[in-house]
Amino acid sequence: MNEMIVSELNSYIDESVALCKRRNCELLEDERSDEAVFEKVKANVYDIVRTILNVAVKTGGGEPGTVQQFFVQKLDRIASDWAASYNKAKLHGDAEKVHLEQIKLDTVREIKSQFAAIWEGKA
Amino acid sequence: MTENEAVSLFKCLSDRSRLQILKSLAIEDMYVERLAERLGITASTVSFHLKKLSDADAVSSYKSQYYTMYSLKKELFTTTILEILQEESDETKAQAQRDAEYRQRVIDSFFEYGKLKSIPAQRKKKRIVLEVIVQAFEYDRIYTEREVNMIIADFHDDFCTIRRDMISERLLVRDAGGKAYRRIKQDGKETEKLS
């Protein structure tokens, strides 16, 4: 796989995590602790994605199609667990959990779209 | 408001976004999207905060056409902090319960069939024992020393020590001449039972 693309994907993750951490600090300073937690949740999602990407690159052995396929499959599987968790929370009227799962799913959606753009050279 | 409810309310209020939601609702009833627009946060985040406020009984909701409107529960906010502080604490009740259990344990271990087995050495336990014995005395009645001794003797042979202890513990009072005794009114610890 093109090292440039991997590097770009990693940069995007690094920048996103840094932004989440900055927002987390700002929100904490502004006495908005729950929203600060939401930023941490987003940062965790980016960290998970970074791990998946690293494994995908190692597994793919430099073959871009394999890397992308492995990455998307893994991410979709994790996201489907979060979606199930979201539905379960919604069913039980657990608004807090619903919101947290929603944040994870929104973050995954954003990452997938950004990754697709980078892979296709549109970012 | 119970202590747990107060803790939950204060926790809930210690967040700027939730405070701003409440400030907005103090102006007028609003729906989620309107609050999100005013506060510059997402609608789902507003919903999250409203759920917490609702759990703390700080807001209520009602349907109005297509919208779920939220309103401030003004009656909650008319309660002063001093009123909350003056509420009897759950912990105070638990403490009272623990004290009562301790008293009963002391009574059970020092009394047998209504007789005092021995005079406790520990002052706290002795006080409890004396409080039980003093219940044999009526309020507003003058006793001679002989009467006092006879009443105490029903509990224990060493009536002299117990009588003197009751005086020093301010359970009984003796007149200046030392001949008449009277029971002193206490603060209502009269519920112990002799087994």
Image (cartoon, grey):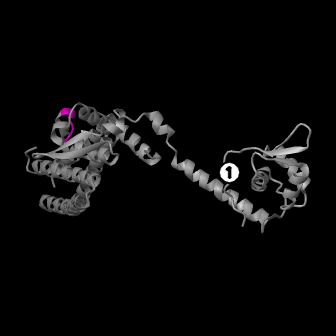
Which residue is depicted at the point 15% across and 50% down?
A115
Q: Is residue B40 highlighted in magenta?
A: yes
Q: Position of residue A8 (x, y in %)?
A: 18, 45
Q: In the image, what residue type sits under mark 1? A: Lys
Instruction: Say which quarter of the image contains residue B193.
Output: bottom right
Please give left or right for residue A32 compared with residue B123 in the image: left
Q: Determine crowd level at label 1: few under 14, some 14-19, many 20+ residues with C-alpha closer than 10 A.
A: few
Instruction: Say which quarter of the image contains residue A69.
Output: bottom left
Q: Position of residue B83 (x, y in %)?
A: 46, 36
Instruction: Say which quarter of the image contains residue B40.
Output: top left
The quarter of the rendered structure image containing the N terminus of chain A is bottom left
Dominant secondary-structure state across the stretch colored magenta: loop
Chain bearing tag 1 is B
Residue position for label 1: B189
Mark 1 residue element? loop
Q: Position of residue A47 (x, y in %)?
A: 29, 51
Please give left or right for residue B178 compared with residue B43 in the image: right
A69 or B154, which is in the foreground?
Answer: B154
Which residue is depicted at the point 81% across and 45% down?
B182
Which residue is depicted at the point 82% across and 57% down?
B120
The quarter of the rendered structure image containing the C terminus of chain A is top left
In the image as oriented, which residue stretches furthest toward the front?
A: B141
Looking at the rendering, the stretch of residues picked out in magenta corresponds to B38-42
For the question of whether residue A12 can be seen, the reply is yes
For the question of whether residue A32 can be seen, the reply is no
A68 or A114, which is in the foreground?
Answer: A114
